[in-house]
Image (cartoon, grey):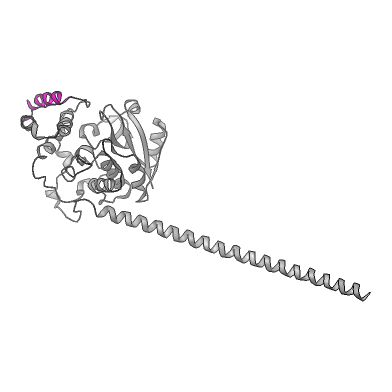
Amino acid sequence: MRSNDRNIRMKERRVGYRKKEQKRNRWFLLAMVAVIAVLVFHIRDIKAELEEMRTMLKRIEVLEYGRIETSVKICPQEETDYVSSIAIMNVEKPVQRTQTETIQRLEELGKNNPDIAAISRSSSQYPEAILTALANNPEMTDFVAGYLGDNEYVEGGLTELEKEQECPLLLQWDPRWGYEPYGGDSCIGLAGCGPTCLSMILYCLTRDETLTPDRIAAYSMENGYYVNGTGTAWGLMEDFPEIYGIKATEPRMTERAVKAELDKGKVLICAMGQGDFTVSGHFIVIYGYGDNGFRVNDPNCVARSRKGWTFEEIKDQIKKIWSYGK
């Protein structure tokens, strides 16, 4: 009888121990869960802080590039609106020409333009690419004429006239940055349509006047976004704006979708194929629309930027489209 009582008490003690052990284990697990939760939150905070630091470092990196001194102030009466200084002329659809055909075209244009005539006479001194560009776009005459000079840069960032505009047209061959190298054997004036478009849309959305085409082009080259033989990689169009809190999305390629993005206050960049804007590849900005069609900023041509474009005219030329907003 006593043996049975003792066995019962021992079983009760073991049950009690097991319950206490289970209770301790539950508390331990709860404590571990709490610790893990705290660590996860701290890791998220640390990750967010590291990401913020990485973004700030990228912004500082961008400011280290370029030769534009944005602190230089020019008196309003001395400022020159470079785009407005470009004479209104008829710019035809770009054409792929042989070297001989390019010289013939320049001789033809030179009959009415003494500067182009002078360039044509000394054509052997110029790279073929810059002569080809001039043959397709005589607006570039002053830029090409200055190519063989000492390439003195116009100091200063955006002018006050440009900063007053919602989305100012910036030209890739503007002397403020056009002669700067971009790629192994080219320059922003010839190959910098991508960085120039990014400069336009970022000023439109952030009003940050320091993000000039030369700085974006230098960042592109230093970070592997320039592809020899091709130009600016599409990845730059998505990655660079993100540094400044601007998100890039890809809307549907329909007129309704594009207008809907613009109605939301967004601006767009289009990668263009052969057609009205280029014989190979090019980037343009779409920043609005009206009765005459879509409003376009073509970084390579003032004339094409001054006209409205219907969606039917450009839709088959668009290879990729990005919409930008905060």
Displayed quadrant of residue 279? top left
Displayed quadrant of residue 24? bottom right
Specify the farthest residue to the right. Answer: 1
Q: Is residue 127 left or right of residue 269?
A: left
Q: Residue at x 87, y 71 (%)?
A: 8
> From the viewer's perspective, is residue 128 above or below residue 53?
above
Q: Nearer the viewer, residue 36 or 135?
A: 36
Q: Residue at x 25, y 52 (%)?
A: 210
Looking at the rendered structure, the number of numbered marks drawn on it comes to 0
Q: Quadrant of the N terminus?
A: bottom right
Main SS, magenta residues: helix
Q: Which residues are magenta?
A: 95-114
Displayed quadrant of residue 27? bottom right
Q: Is residue 159 visible?
A: yes
> From the viewer's perspective, is residue 163 above or below residue 304?
below
> From the viewer's perspective, is residue 92 above or below residue 249?
above
Q: Nearer the viewer, residue 131 or 167?
A: 131
Q: Nearer the viewer, residue 57 or 252?
A: 57
> From the viewer's perspective, is residue 166 above or below residue 136?
below
> Which x, y percent locates residue 159?
19, 48
